[in-house]
Image (tube, grey):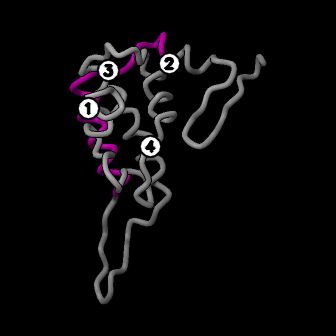
C-alpha cells in the first residue's frame, strides 16, 4: 500500500465519502502538507509512525473544518446531536498517543518555506 492510501485508510478518508464536511476527501497536496509539518519525507520509505503522525495531523485539520458545522441536525420529527469535530479530535489524540508528534525541524521547515499550501490556502512568509 502506498503512503497516500495508507494515510487515507488510517483516517477513514478512502472511498467516495471522506472525513471533511460534505464528504470531501483530502487531496494529495493536503496530505503532502500534513506530512511535511510532521517532518515526514515522502520518498517511498515511510514508516507506520510516519503514516500515524500524518494521519493525526489530517484529523486535527478535519476537526477544525467540522468545528464550523452545526452539532444538531434535524432529521424529520427527531433531532440528532453529534459532534464530528470532537470525534475527529479524539481519534487524532489516539494517534498522537500512539505515534507521537512530528519533529520540530519538520514543522519549522514547513512554516518557513517561501510559499506553502495549507488546507485551501497558500501562505507566504513575511520574509519573501
Marking on residue 107: 2
Residue at 55 percent across and 20 percent down: it is 110
Marking on residue 95: 1
Kindly give the residue lying farthest to the right in the view shown: 128
In the depicted structure, whether residue 68 falls above or below residue 78: above
Q: Earlier in the sequence, mark 3 or mark 2?
A: 3
Marking on residue 22: none
State if disc 4 and disc 3 touch (CB < 8 Å).
Answer: no
Q: CA distance from mark 3 to mark 2?
A: 14 Å
Is 68 on the left or on the right of 54, as rendered?
right
Q: CA distance from mark 3 to mark 1?
A: 11 Å
Report crowding for label 2: few under 14, some 14 to 19, many 20 or more residues within 10 A (C-alpha): some
Q: Which residue is mark 3?
A: 50
State if disc 2 and disc 1 touch (CB < 8 Å).
Answer: no
In the depicted structure, whether residue 97 falls above or below residue 89: above
Q: In the rendered structure, does residue 23 fall within the stretch colored magenta?
A: no
* SS type, badge 4: loop
Q: Which residue is mark 4?
A: 26
Q: Earlier in the sequence, mark 1 or mark 4?
A: 4
Q: Quadrant of residue 94?
A: top left
Magenta-colored span: 84-106
The percent coordinates of residue 87 (x first, y second) are 29, 50
Residue at 37 percent across and 40 percent down: it is 59
The percent coordinates of residue 80 (x first, y second) are 29, 74
* SS type, badge 3: helix
Is 3 on the left or on the right of 42, as rendered?
left
Q: Earlier in the sequence, mark 1 or mark 2?
A: 1
* SS type, badge 1: helix
State if disc 4 and disc 2 touch (CB < 8 Å).
Answer: no
Which numbered mark, 3 or 1, is in the foreground of this view? Answer: 3
* SS type, badge 2: helix
Amino acid at each position: 500500500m502506498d503512503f497516500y492510501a495508507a494515510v487515507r485508510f488510517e483516517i477513514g478518508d478512502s472511498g467516495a465519502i471522506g472525513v471533511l464536511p460534505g464528504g470531501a476527501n483530502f487531496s494529495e497536496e493536503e496530505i503532502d502538507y500534513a506530512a511535511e509539518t510532521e517532518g515526514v519525507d515522502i520518498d517511498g520509505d515511510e514508516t507506520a509512525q510516519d503514516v500515524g503522525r500524518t494521519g493525526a495531523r489530517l484529523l486535527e485539520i478535519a476537526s477544525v473544518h467540522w468545528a464550523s458545522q452545526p452539532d444538531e441536525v434535524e432529521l424529520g420529527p427527531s433531532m440528532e446531536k453529534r459532534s464530528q469535530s470532537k470525534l475527529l479530535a479524539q481519534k487524532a489524540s489516539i494517534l498522537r498517543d500512539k505515534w507521537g508528534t512530528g519533529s520540530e525541524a519538520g514543522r519549522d521547515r514547513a512554516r518557513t518555506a517561501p510559499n506553502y499550501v495549507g488546507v485551501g490556502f497558500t501562505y507566504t512568509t513575511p520574509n519573501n
